[in-house]
Image (tube, helix red, strand yellow):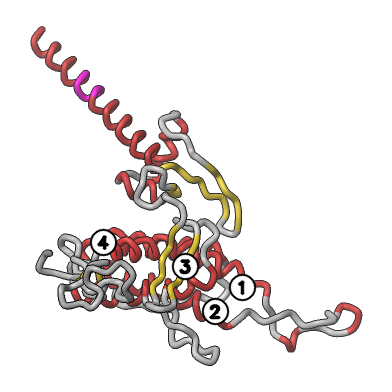
Amino acid sequence: MGDRVCIRGCTQRQHFADCPDYGKTDGTCRGCVPAEARERSWICDRCFGRTRRMITDAPDLLGRIRSLGDPTKARAYDQVGSGAARNVEAPAPIPADLIDAGDAIAGTLRAWASMLEHRGWDSRGLPAGADAADAYEEAQGNASVILDELPKLANDQDMIIALTAAALDLHPAVDGIRERWSIADAMYRWNVERPTEAFVEVHEDDEEITVGGVTEWGTEHEIWDRRQAAREVGVSEESLRRWVREKDLHPVATTRGPLGKVTWFRAAAVRAAAAAVAARKGKKAEATASSDHQVGSME
């Protein structure tokens, strides 16, 4: 085992020699040996993956929350109207949980991105009237900043404690009141319309949240939107559009919904396209260099 173990207290399914369940297959101890931290990190591989997954899916989750409680469809009770145009029933208010969770997720992403980009610590939620598309757009940009810095943050003890708490900690409601909202709290409550993986499962005995079900995360079958695809291979979104026009890359799907039109690509296809374009550029550069050399020799 390395010098560092997961700072969140994760354990492996192994037992110390003095554990009463050592050597048993039907014991009650689920493992008491600390989980080894990933290289250059204060958290284990599992916590790192879960944190990355939550931040990656947070923009979709926020868009879903805003679409479920669209503030543009709500109105004050004192403006219901009168006479023939009066509604029989006043419109239902937006549930407080949707407002609180949406503001918490937006504020978390904005605060971390602001800090990482040295803009100060801005933890404000979304502005009044922001629709699902606005929420997604801002959250996606902020999430991208955090994801780019995640390996570095994981090696900072104070930073990763705070970030994993905001992403992974669960705060069960007590008498209908929740202390605060983390991304995991909202994921457990609503999930996302296009989750990275298929479902959210919470183990109440240890307050552990697991997102799983489809073997897409971390595999060549993973699906990326255009923004994530561009970030993963280090090109601009316009370059991705050009690859599609030139038939180097083919989308796997295009969806329309509260977030507008979104184009999806297989991770393997994006990487293959990037390699093909790079190889073509390399051959072109070699041909140009060879031509220049021949011209120089003739002179």
Name which residue lies at 49% across and 77% down.
101
- Mark 4 vs 2, N-terminal side: 4
Q: Nearer the viewer, residue 31 or 85?
A: 31
Nearer the observer: mark 1 or 3; the answer is: 3
- The amino acid type, in three-letter code, at marker 4 is Asp
Question: Is label 1 in a helix, a strand or a loop?
Answer: loop
Q: Nearer the viewer, residue 228 or 48?
A: 48
Q: Quadrant of the C terminus?
A: top left
Inter-mark Cα distance, 4 to 1: 35 Å
Instruction: Provide the residue designation for mark 2.
Output: 99
Inter-mark Cα distance, 2 to 1: 8 Å
Give the class, few, some or many, for how many residues have Cα within 10 Å of label 4's Cα (few <14, many ≥20).
some
Inter-mark Cα distance, 4 to 3: 19 Å
Instruction: Provide the residue designation for mark 4.
Output: 45
Q: Which mark is residue 69?
A: 1
Instruction: State the image coordinates of residue 219 (x, y, percent, origin top left).
Output: 36, 46
Give the class, few, some or many, for how many residues have Cα within 10 Å of label 3's Cα (few <14, many ≥20).
some
- Mark 2 vs 3, N-terminal side: 2
Would you place residue 283 above or below residue 12 in this image?
above
Nearer the observer: mark 4 or 3; the answer is: 3
- The amino acid type, in three-letter code, at marker 1 is Gly
**Left or right placement of residue 278 versus residue 226 in this view:** left
